[in-house]
Structures are given as structure tokens and as C-alpha cells.
Image (tube, rainbow, N blue to C red):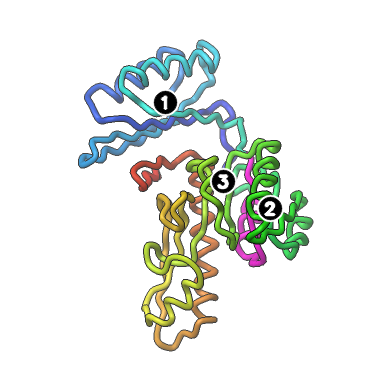
Amino acid sequence: MAPADPQCATLLVTCPDRRGLVAALAQGLHGHGGNILDADQHTDTGAGQFFQRIRVDLGELHSDRRSLEGAIGEVAERFDMRWRVAYADEVKRVALFVSKVDHCLWDLLLRIRSGEMSCTPVAILSNHPDLEPVAEFFDVPFHVFPITKETKAAQETRERELLEALDVDLIVLARYMQVLSGDFVAAYPNRIINIHHSFLPAFMGGRPYHQAFERGVKLVGATAHYATTDLDEGPIIEQDVVRCSHRDSVPDLLRKGRDLERTVLARAVRWHLEDRILAYANKTVVFS
């Protein structure tokens, strides 16, 4: 992946659909010297909602970023918009949560090292010490927070303190086999991506491949979604499936599923890092 142009910014917009939205945004950006490189939009006619992603070249900006954001804010107030702007030179800081299974962690760290994903992995947090050698290999700080029913609340408080101290932008649950509390999830809305080893909404909860085997399904899948206070029911970002048959055992399903988990999680994380996702009504718009 080519490195992002540090002179670029990405604007994401959600608002009720009405005439003049696109023109108003374009005029506001142009008036401050912003050059629109590409724009994509979607309208949910049933919900009456408009979504847009605009990439802007700021190389000839007439003013500073605060003034540009002020202009966007004026348009947003007129059209009741929710919006955010991400600057390419502000690289996102990512924390990875893991337990004992390592395939998603290896895959993400290799992709980051190769430049496929633009982010800085600032910490790996785990409830077990098993994957510390992986963290050492990639020179990422590793933190262990052993969790039991009695210590869960206190340990989550410590984890949140660490995340705040590290100024983390995104949390990735790379097969973290713990259920985060509602308070923890609520503190990071649309900033926690989980990989579930099933094609949701089928086989929620634990041991989904075993559930799939018992049902004799002909497809197994993986789902990347934003975590919410409702377990495995957050807005879905990406999914994929692979065929299976009566000849497949549970270990076969686990092997096939691991391949899907890696690629599905990687795509979801990359799209988030590239500011391609807008979540609404427990769904997502993912711009290509």
C-alpha cells in the first residue's frame, strides 16, 4: 500500500437527506483552498439518511485546519450533520487485545510491519502471558492483566487507564476470549473491533465451530464488527465464508475458520484506519 499523502484529509458525514448537501460541502471546502480528490456517497432512502466520504488535498489551503473545521462546522449546523475529519499525518494509535490464540495477532502485526496498514501498535494487552514472545518479536510493549470474576472490574479499570495514557485511537480484539463489560465498551463507541469466529447472527457466543459442526452446516464464516454492550450484536463491518462438508471434523472447521478470521479482521481494521466506515442504526456504510 502506498503511504498516505500527509497533505490529505478525509471527511466523513452523516445527516438527514435533503437537497444541497453535496454542493454546500464542496463550496465550503473549495472556499478554503481544499481540493476534492474523490468523493463517495450513499443514501438510505428508507431511513432518510445521507452518508458521504470526501478525500481532500490540503496542499493549497488558504487557512489553517481550525478555520477549515470551522467552515465544515457551519455547514454541519445548517444541515444537522454529524461529521469528523481525519488528517493523514495523524497516524492512529492501536492497542491489540489477545488471549492465547495467536493467528490474528501475527497476521495484523505482519501487515502493519509491511506497510499494508498505516498505524502505530502501541500496546498488546492480554489476560494470559502466552503471547509475550510475539510482542517481543515485533517490539510492541506487552501487558498482562489476569482476569477472574472477582478481579474483572479492577483489571478493566487498569486497562482503561493504560489506554488513556497511551492515547489509543482503536482497540482490536484479536481473538480476545473475554467479554468486556458494558462500561468498558461504552467508553469507546465504534472504536473497538472484534473478530467473531462465526457468520453472525448464526452461532453467537462461545464454541461456534462446535455449534456449526453439531448443526451440520455447509458454510462456516467469520465476522468483524464493532463491539457494543450487546454481545456479538454490534454493527457488522465485514464477513466471509468458506464451504465445508460432512467430511469435515471440528478441527477441520477450526483450521478453515482461522484463515477467514485473519483476512476478515484485517480488512475491517484497514477500512477503519482509512476512515471508510460510518456506523448507524447498528449497521455500517463501508466506502470502497
Mark 2 lies on residue:
125
Mark 3 lies on residue:
184
Mark in the foreground, 2 or 1? 2
Mark in the foreground, 3 or 2? 3
Mark 1 lies on residue:
36
> How far is mark 2 from mark 1, CA to CA?
39 Å
Tell me the quarter of the picture where residue 201 sits.
bottom left
Dot 3 or dot 1, earlier in sequence: 1
Which of 27 and 130 lies nearest the eye of the viewer?
Answer: 130
Question: Is residue 112 one of those drawn in magenta?
Answer: yes
| Amino acid of disc 3 | Phe
Task: Give how far across and how far down residue 128 sits, in percent.
Answer: 71, 62
Question: Is residue 235 one of those drawn in magenta?
Answer: no
Which of 72 and 236 lies nearest the eye of the viewer?
Answer: 236
Mark 2: secondary structure: strand
- The residue located at (54%, 81%) in the rendering is 251
Neighbour tally class for label 1: few under 14, some 14-19, many 20 plus, Cα within 10 Å: some
Establish if 202 lies above or below 275: below
Mark 1: secondary structure: strand
